[in-house]
Amino acid sequence: MGTHLVQLNPDGSKRPLAEGFQSARDADVSWDGRKILFAGKHTATDAWDIFEMDADGSNIRQVTRNLGSCHSPIYTSSYYTITEKEPWEQIAFVRYGVDQFDERSPNPATALWTCKLDGSYPQRITYNLSSDLDPAILPDGRIAYASWRRADFQDGTAGRLALETLNTDGTDRAPAVRRDDVARRMPCVTPAGDLIFVEPHDRSNGPGRLAGVSLRRPLHTYMVLTGPRDGLFHSPAPLPDGSLVVEWFPPKDGGGTPGLVRLDLAARTIEPILLPVEGKAIQPKAIAPRPRPDGRSSVVSPEDSEAELYCLDSSANDFRDPSWMPAGTVKTIRILEGMPEGPSRAISFKQLAEALPVLSPRRILAEIPVQPDGSFHAKVPANVPIQLQALDERGLALRSCGWIWARSHQAQGCIGCHEDPERTPPNRVPDALKTDVAMAVVPDLAHPTPDFAKDIAPIIESKCLPCHQGGKQRPELPSAGARDAVALDRLHAAILGPIDAGGAARGTARYVHPGRARTSPLTMHILGTRTARPWDDAEASRDVKPIPAGQAPALTGSETQTIIRWIDLGARRGALPEARRQAPSGSNP
């Protein structure tokens, strides 16, 4: 059995829509209430495509073609570029990746795309290495959406399901809600200008409590709207009177039948609309006119393969104690490119659960100095996942951002390093804009990406095995002298050690915290000092066991930096996948 679209009339009668489809889902209503977008497929083996029909179910036409599986369409604001004579209407939708697998699961990754209403000019607008989903249009024309974030293990091995916003051309991605451990998805906007969303209790697609923020100050107005006694909710959608239509599940210790309800948050009332006897009623939408969002213009030029990143002051941050990272602490910015992996790396959930957690491959594009005022400015490849790491004087990553990107020809800026974007930045021209832009469009040979077999294993054998193989030190490390895959696997597993459930980063290894060299016991061992910072919680007071003097050959500065870079890049065992883009002409080799 498939899924179906049904029109529920005021008198309680129901009428099927999108007849002739094996499955139809994800309805969205046009601004005048006369059209409906939906995802559909005619047979069970078809890929999902986007269709549009009149609100009464007639005049069905296909929008997307030959893009693979597409779903969750929404009407967006009008779109304008300086190269076109007139703005055009477009839609946004979720598309499954054809050759990119999700970094946190064995499934293809999903990304947000847009196209014109006739299906032409398809554009990918998000470049996360995990999946993006649940787009919703905001009154100012931006898109709110749910995004899996897993650039490190700070939120555990599964990552974090966060709410983000961005322009309809994919520029200016920003958090929609403050960061914490709560999963958030299914956003919608009320007529009053509040962003309402579901916080699933199981961090997935299931129901959960409702929460919201004011779009005027989203990072400082977060409020939980429902409690355990109210039940659980799924797929909220606004009604013209300001209330919500939402799928409701009664509390476990209370009575009631699951179904569609009208939820008045101000009056704290739940009124039944439809209590289904068979199946589930999900993804409700009101067939009614609604305000048209603001139009958006764009500087994106698809023919340009480069973009720019700049920062006003890398010392600006959101720490509760300003003394933790004062001005001058950040010496260098490392720019990393995330490397998508295709079907060849597809593994099962069982393997993911049993194997040592692994971060996605990434390579160093450049390490650029921070200017005296904390600013930096770099040219980067457009339309690829980018991660920035702020480095201290030892080359240790102090803070790392999630996956960001810049679109073709865009200049993407930020105020600082995890700063509060609702604060007014200093009114000055940063030093970095007065100097030549740093080139980071292809890997810089001066900062090679460490490879475990070629770079790390030889250091371990020459500098660590004299004490850790057959001696009194523990753990004993196996030799990788033969350079065969089995020996390298054993050596890698021994270096990382067993999973330490009580570590600073949940699910990380005992001796190495992939992506966080500063909290890794191995780093403190080879540097002989505590490198964790005050914001690293328990790791900030970890005991340090330096290498005993005279008992092993000393590591050179280059060897130490190689190990630090390897850990901060994820401490991977395997080699990097092949790059899937061409270096732009005129870029540095």
Image (spheres, rainbow, N blue to C red):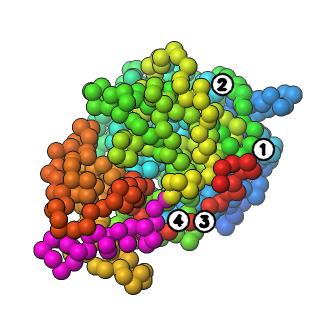
Q: Determine whether the residue tagged by mark 1 lies in a helix, strand or loop.
A: loop
- Provide residue 373's location: percent of width, then percent of height: 46, 25
Q: Residue at x 16, y 61 (%)?
A: 549
Label 3, on which residue?
578
Q: Which residues are magenta?
A: 449-474
What residue sits 69% from the left and 54% below the top?
Answer: 583
Query: What secondary structure predominates along the stretch shown in magenta?
Result: helix
Tell me the number on the disc at residue 293: 2
- Tell us which disc is closer to us: 4 or 2: 4
Q: Disc 4 designates what residue?
A: 576
Which tag, 3 or 1, sits closer to the chain's start? 1
Is 524 left, or right, of 223 in this rendering?
left
Give, as a three-letter code, the residue at label 3.
Glu
In the image, what residue type sits under mark 2? Pro
- Please give the count of numbered marks on the rendered protein: 4
Q: Residues within 10 Å of mark 1 (few under 14, many from 20)?
A: few
Of mark 1 and mark 4, the one earlier in the sequence is 1
Cα distance in 3D space between marks 1 and 4: 27 Å
Q: Are marks 3 and 4 in contact (CB under 8 Å)?
A: yes
* Mark carried by residue 303: 1
